[in-house]
Amino acid sequence: MTTTRIRTVKATLGDYSSLAGWEAGEQGDLPTLDEIRKAECYNFADANDVAFSGWETDSTRYIWVFVPLAERHDGTSRDVGGTGYQISSGSSVGTIRPVEDYVVLEGLNIKNTTIDAAINWTSGTFTASTNSHTLLNCIIQNANTASTKYTLNASISNLIITLENCIVYGGTRSIDCRNATTVTINNCTFWRHTDQIGIIADTELTCKNTYAGKSSGTNEDFWTGGAAPSGNNNASSDTSAATDYTATQTSESGSANFINVTAGSENFGLKSDATIIGDGAAGITTYDILGTTRDVSAPDIGAFEYVAAGGGRTTKNTDAFPLGDRYGMSFGFRTH
Amino acid sequence: MVELLVKRQANYINPDPGKHKRSVYERGDIVVAMPDGWGWGKEEHPMTSTESPTPFFIVKIPGVTVKEAQKYLQPEVDDTNPTIVLSRRLWRINIDDVPSGIKKTILDTGEVTLEFAQIKNFIHNKQTGINER
């Protein structure tokens, strides 16, 4: 029976003091070991980039990097909120480089301090039809400097990725996934501080309940230059959401919808009068980036579900989060 | 002073020799470079690790900064196409070549403090075959 081997990554008194150390210490043939290997990352700033490389994985024995709710970001970057596990580097090849077939990243704040990628898949060689890269509840950012590079560089053949309840922002283009095989983006928020293109995708992308916007300029939030992706209930600060998607909201400015879109103070929580509240399609995600239960019939667009003042949040126990049911990857029992 | 986390041996042999060479950490590879007094994790320090054999040892080098040591964390890449990674690290510490006294300290305590002059001749560039000067 598959077991889950958990090792902590902490600033002090953990099993490892960096995710890079964990990766080097835990590297292994997981199907042969019959193990999921899980890094449980705690609230601190980790300044070492990492490649998940040199492992063997499959759909039931995979690499899982997880931040417990109590150690996680508060919905903003560690730079803004001062809390949560943040992995940050100025690596020109990307702060995190998932090179193996099955990787889950959950609850991390991933940052590149330059215009280079926070996550870069393009050095990987992925097995056709049998890989899965899942990003849940992550805040992903790079420098507030204009560039045609990408915060997420996912344009590599065979790649299958899912982004859910993630916030992606910086000065560069948000994501390029054109050469990937299947890309699913649900309830994410993309923001550029500069006039760069946002989501660059072709038919591999299915995008729902997602917001893409920028501070100003004319480059498209959802690039419309290629073969049309599919999806619905997306919103953009310009009119580009309406080209490829149905049931869209257009001309939705960031300042009108989000608490703070100023560089260095970003908070993509929804304002009480945000016009993208209730505009999402039902049944796409159950929880938001902080674990708030989404409205069943009329959820919000983006990573956050609006909670009225005093309304409280209903948070989930993420240890029981049914990843296996949803992403074709299964849980085992933990060992330590 | 910098403290280097050094791989004691590969965790396993990947069945694909090409993949193994390209991506599995090998004996002597330097994984991370941290500042003086770093609080290493339980599994990172041989004296507290639950693994057998222990995966790492630690080399402390006074007079070398973390920034200066970053060069030892670079991957070995193809000269003609730097996007092609040949192995996880360009540099390694040739543990088996260090003087027996130093090796004994490493084995006994899991860590060793050395002046750069003492260790540089054992920091090996895999591509050029030349040791650090």
Image: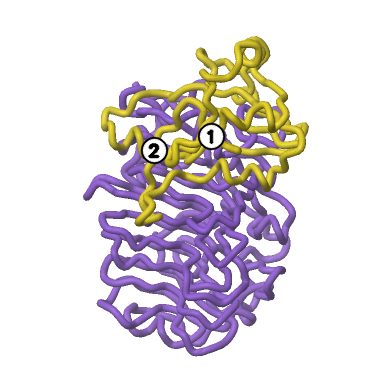
Can you say whether A201 is above or below A96 in the image? below
Residue A237 location (% of width, % of height): 51, 83
Give the color scheme: rainbow, by chain, secondary structure or one colour.
by chain
Image colour assigned to chain B: yellow
Whether residue A320 is visible, yes or no, is no
| Chain to which mark 1 belongs | B
Can you tell which chain is drawn purple? A
What's the mark number on residue A89? none
Can you say whether A52 is above or below A88 in the image? above
In the image, what residue occupies the spot 69% across and 75% down? A262
| Chain to which mark 2 belongs | B
In the image, what residue occupies the spot 51% across and 37% down? B91
Whether residue A249 is visible, yes or no, is yes
Can you say whether A334 is above or below A58 in the image? above
Distance CA(mark 1)–CA(mark 2):
22 Å
Residue type of the residue flagged with mark 2: Ser
Q: Is residue A115 left or right of residue A230?
A: right
Q: Which residue is mark 1?
A: B131
Q: Which residue is mark 2?
A: B23
Residue type of the residue flagged with mark 1: Asn
To the question of a shared chain for discs 1 and 2, the answer is: yes
Residue A77 location (% of width, % of height): 65, 59
